[in-house]
Image (tube, rainbow, N blue to C red):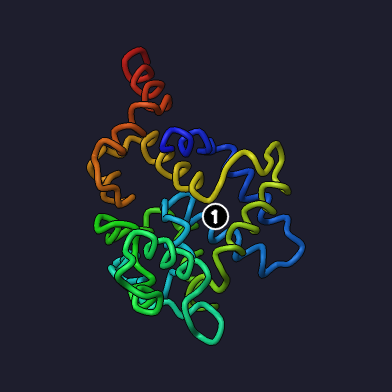
């Protein structure tokens, strides 16, 4: 599955085309929302569930850091209750723990995928990302829509992007896009693991091992 996700990673040029696709949306507000979520997913490497649940309390503007908590009560659903994403995740958890009831499990959501996913992710290294996060927070307090809207926005941006279509990447593919981008720029395995919240260092090493840009850069340094 990890290999399949890496295969959905976009190149730098393809990702820029995707951003242009988002800019081509007729509705300006929708375009800005979509571009923001693409930058957060495709450059910061947040998981789709993390993007969906971004909250103002996660953002430290002085440190230019986004801190993903171990728990943040979801109120993104109807009537201020848990959203469909969290409800589905809770139901899946019940399949493995029949001793609990749905209401009890829902109290635990939202939470990150693993303990390693509780982390700080810097965003000040790229002003496009910093502006996108600050705009989302100032305008809405976070991502203002559902997980399914996140998916639809990506599909629309792909449709409007030159040379891309819906099969080229996914929401998880955006995360792989970010990992490939940072590995290609020379980020070491340890910081890469920390940034992406992976439990195993081997996952970060896999991205570094398959990235051709690092090889090209090393050859340039040797033969340049």
Is residue 54 found left or right of 155 in the rendered image? Answer: left
- Element at label 1: helix
Indicate whether 222 appears above or below 207: above
- Which of 203/161 is in front? 203
**Disc 1: which residue:** 38
Q: Residue 214 at what x, y percent from top left?
A: 37, 27
- Which of 83/175 is in front? 83
- Kindly tell me whether residue 223 is visible in this rendering: yes
Q: How many marks?
A: 1
Extreme bottom residue here? 79
Residue at 31 percent of width and 66 percent of height: 67
- Which of 130/101 is in front? 101
Quarter in which the N terminus is drawn: top left
Rate crowding at label 1 as few (under 14), some (14 to 19) or many (20 or more) other CA atoms within 10 Å. many
- Kindly tell me whether residue 135 is visible in this rendering: no
**Quarter assignment of residue 216:** top left
Q: Residue 110 at what x, y percent from top left?
A: 38, 70
Quarter in which the C terminus is drawn: top left
**Quarter assignment of residue 130:** bottom left
Q: Residue 58 at what x, y percent from top left?
A: 35, 71
Extreme right residue here? 26
Residue at 65 percent of width and 58 percent of height: 152
Is residue 123 found left or right of 198 in the rendered image? Answer: right
């Amino acid at each position: 599955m990890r290999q399949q996700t890496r295969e959905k990673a976009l190149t730098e040029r393809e990702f820029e085309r995707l951003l242009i696709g988002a800019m081509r949306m007729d509705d300006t507000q929708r375009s800005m929302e979509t571009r923001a979520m693409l930058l957060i997913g495709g450059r910061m490497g947040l998981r789709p569930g993390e993007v969906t649940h971004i909250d103002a309390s996660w953002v430290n503007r002085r440190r230019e850091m986004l801190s993903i908590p171990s728990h943040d009560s979801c109120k993104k659903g109807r009537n201020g209750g848990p959203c469909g994403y969290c409800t589905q995740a809770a139901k899946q958890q019940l399949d493995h723990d029949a001793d609990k009831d749905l209401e009890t499990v829902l109290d635990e959501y939202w939470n990150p995928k693993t303990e390693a996913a509780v982390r700080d992710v810097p965003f000040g290294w790229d002003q496009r990302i910093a502006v996108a996060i600050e705009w989302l927070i100032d305008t809405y307090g976070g991502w203002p829509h559902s997980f399914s809207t996140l998916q639809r926005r990506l599909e629309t941006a792909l449709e409007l992007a030159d040379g891309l279509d819906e099969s080229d990447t996914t929401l998880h593919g955006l995360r792989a896009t970010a990992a490939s981008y940072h590995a290609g720029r020379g980020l070491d395995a340890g910081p890469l693991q920390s940034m992406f919240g992976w439990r195993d260092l081997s996952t970060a090493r896999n991205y570094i091992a398959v990235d051709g840009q690092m090889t090209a850069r090393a050859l340039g340094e040797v033969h340049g």
